Amino acid sequence: MADHKDAIKENSMIIQKEMLAKQFKDLSMATELGKKVVYTFVPGNLTELILSFDMLPVYPEINALQSGMRKKSAEYIRDAEKIGFSEDVCTYVKCDIGMMLNGNIGPTGEKIPPPDLLLLSYTGCFTFLKWFENLERLYPGVPVAMLHTPYQEDGIMTEDQINYMVKQLKEEVIPKMEQVSGQKYDHERLAKMMENSAKAEDLLVKILESAKNVPSPIDAYFAGVYYIGPIFTAFRGTQDAVDYYTELWNEVQERMRLGLGPVTPEGEIKEEKFRLVVEGPPNWTNFREFWKIFYDMGAVIVASSYTKVGGVYDLGFRHDPKEPLESLSKYCMGVYTNMNLPQRVDMLEKYVKDYKADGFLINSIKSCNSFSAGQLMIMREIEQRASVPVGFIESDLVDPRYFSYANIKNRLESYFQMLEQRKIILKQEETTV
Amino acid sequence: MNKYYLGVDLGSTTSKAVIINEQDEIIGRGITNTRSNYSVAADIARDEAIYNARFSILQKNIQKEIEFSPEFKKYITDLESVFQYEQFKVRLDRLGEELVKTCNTMFVDEDKRKTMLGHLINIRKAFKPVIKRDYLYNNLGSKNQFFRDIVSEKYNEEVNKLEMSLFEPLMTVWDKSISPAENERVQFNFKELIHKAMDELKDKYKNLPDASAEDTSINFDAEMNLLKGKFDHVSDSLRKHIDEIADLEFNIANMTGTGYGRALLPFPEDCIRSEILCHAFGAHAVFPETRTVLDIGGQDTKAIQVDKYGLVTSFQMNDRCAAGCGRYLGYIADEMSISINELGPMAMESEKEVVICSTCTVFAGAELRELTNLGEKRADILGGLHKAIIMRAMSLIARSGGVFNEFTFTGGVARNPAVIKYLAQLVKENYGDNIKINIHTDSIFMGALGGAMFARRNIAVELPSAKKNKEVA
């Protein structure tokens, strides 16, 4: 998705590009193809269910991040602010609204069709509610299906919560999908798709966990959001997704066999100097520049939380063909943004230990309350529990006004030096004792 | 041969250089205002630190004599002041040339040009002896001692005495001349200059009236009388030692550059290090029990946690806004038309701190005017402003994890007494009475000191910016 001419690409990246190109082509021809379009969110998405009705999903936050990468977001945000959105509103929202105001042209230059259904799968982020209230006004008369996912306040999923979710799916979501698509709900078809989901999930987990290797063959943050993760959301449940992840897993295995480091837009990292766990979304407007600061220093991200927004499969969850609706419910409740803070800390601590990380870094997002809440507590807990140096930088999702290259670079340089010095001095201590 | 280590801290407002010996003792300090040209600023700070180091070595070499005869020490401190004046004079001549040059290009009309040149000569005549006196009798005191500040204050004073219509053209001439004059590294011959200084000092003492505590024309100094009586003897017995340190070949074995402008330093790549690490390392070296460091510099506030090795475990910095840093105080001083060094003492007179709501420097300036109009006392407003600075810093400290064990305050702002007062107050309020607060007299040099200490330990760390520089080179 970092679509630069000079970027070095793996085969999987080319396949991904083709898949996405086809997806946007299909979307632009939705009317001709007779397909209905569902706007919905990445965290706790119901992709299999949408696809089982032969509808096409659109994910506004993915469009927003694409606009950020294509340097369109500044203009879109400006237009959203012109019609009254405050400076403090989530920039994914403003960028998305701005894109719609400007003709809803997607990343491939093709028009994204208006929604036939607004599926508000509300998972962890309060802004989602307001976001779709705005879309409802932009597209008057479009039906809205609301799926309210109970927050894991106590860190557990109860039977009652699962029943509540299944009830909503049966009584609210599925009837609306039937009405919009004109098709009956097909339980068998959904179950069949879930088999594919589980296969792709197994592969995805293997790929993500390959970062436990030293050196890691992948970057689990930058590459994680750039080509490892995105296919998952839009294509989960399809044979294409299984094929894609099979190819990617083969590539990763080959890298491990050859002892190669992660692929970056400028080739692979020659020497892995630091292994980091990162919490928080990346900055998209300066994605390449941002990533470059890391790979120039030999810093590899071995695990990240943002790649778990679409599901925390490495902790064991799989979509289950035997109980499709129940497993969709569990899936929605289990995604990273729906986990409570102690669960997040536990997961990140586990990552630091399991992935043998040298440090823990937070990229705090100016316009994202959802992620920012609790980050300092998370940082302190990880520092104490895992005894690794922690770092904190600030930027934004897609508002270029909040990416200060000099400030970020200064902090990251200091942080990397901190890690390096620690290694040197602790080694000296070891040898002198 | 003795080995020395250099640390250069290129801050956003001032550039500092520190030289240490193999025992980690500071033997040379140099400071200058950071200019548009970073490498000149670094050179000037380093030159100054080396001169200062020669004087320190001189003191060390005659340590025994000093113990028995305090007049030796007095001679050396006086000599260093006069030496600084000699440097100042060279720079002033350089500025004079620039002023004439600007005048010649700016005023095409010959009469006008002549008038302006006449004014410039008069201005210079008026302030030169004042500055000389300030240097020779240590009257510069707590005032800012950078060339630009000293000269600009006097120039302004003189221009203000002239008629209004001359203000604008004379200030334009000034603005166009000061930067080129300042942004040039003047190479001095130390030996030549110190001999000049010795002659100048001799004149000073020859013409010195017997000073007493009642005499207000010069700063009363009992040691001055002591030295006056033995001047020739002291001067003669020191000459050999002075020549020795003037001829001393100064061997800088290793160096480290740090600070905001570090990437622009003409240093080898493994000699450049983040200022966060340097401040922490310096503070920890001076106060080994330090676990939390607060550094308030020109545009950055940093809250740093260090471990028992002086290694940084986490840090927080101000982002997006530099309100509450040194420049904030500079702006407020400008708004109040006083010198930045007067702010702290004035705030110390505050009886109740006025609450300053604004977190923005520019708005704080407006708030200050508003509060003045409402009849609030200057001291109370300044008290509130200083407290606001510390409240911002406290929030960063909280973000970095709080205050542990000993707490060390570094950076240029650590010289401000009101900042120290509110810091002590708020640290105790928030973290209890048991926290020991350290503020070193060299707090502004802590980053450069940490750098020099890294240089002595020769711990190489690679930096992308340094790598880039190498590629360019």
Image (cartoon, rainbow, N blue to C red):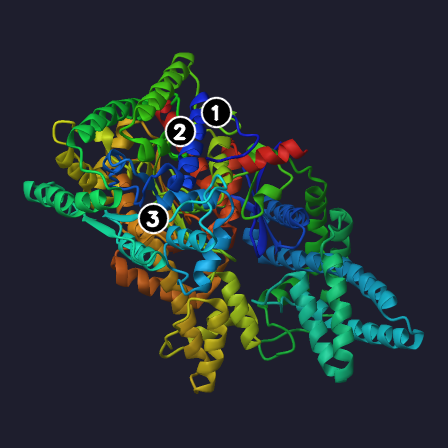
- Name the residue furthest right: B110
Marks 2 & 1 on one chain? yes
Image quadrant holding the C terminus of chain B, namely: top right
> Which is nearer the N-term, disc 1 or disc 3?
3
Q: Residues within 10 Å of mark 3 (few under 14, many from 20)?
A: many
Percent across and percent down for residue A272 are 43, 25
Q: Nearer the viewer, residue A56 or A391?
A: A56
- Identify residue for label 1: A269
Label 1 sits on what residue type? Ile
Q: Chain of mark 3?
A: A
Percent across and percent down for residue B450 are 49, 43
Q: Nearer the viewer, residue A285 or A345?
A: A285
Is residue B219 visible in this depiction of the protein? yes
Mark 2–mark 1 distance (CA, rounded to whole Å): 10 Å
Residue found 22% across the figure and 25% down from its top: A198
Percent across and percent down for residue B48 are 65, 50
Label 3 sits on what residue type? Pro
Q: Chain of mark 1?
A: A
CB of mark 2 within 8 Å of CB of mark 1? yes
Which labelled disc corresponds to residue A115? 3
Residue B176, picture quadrant: bottom right
- Identify residue for label 2: A219
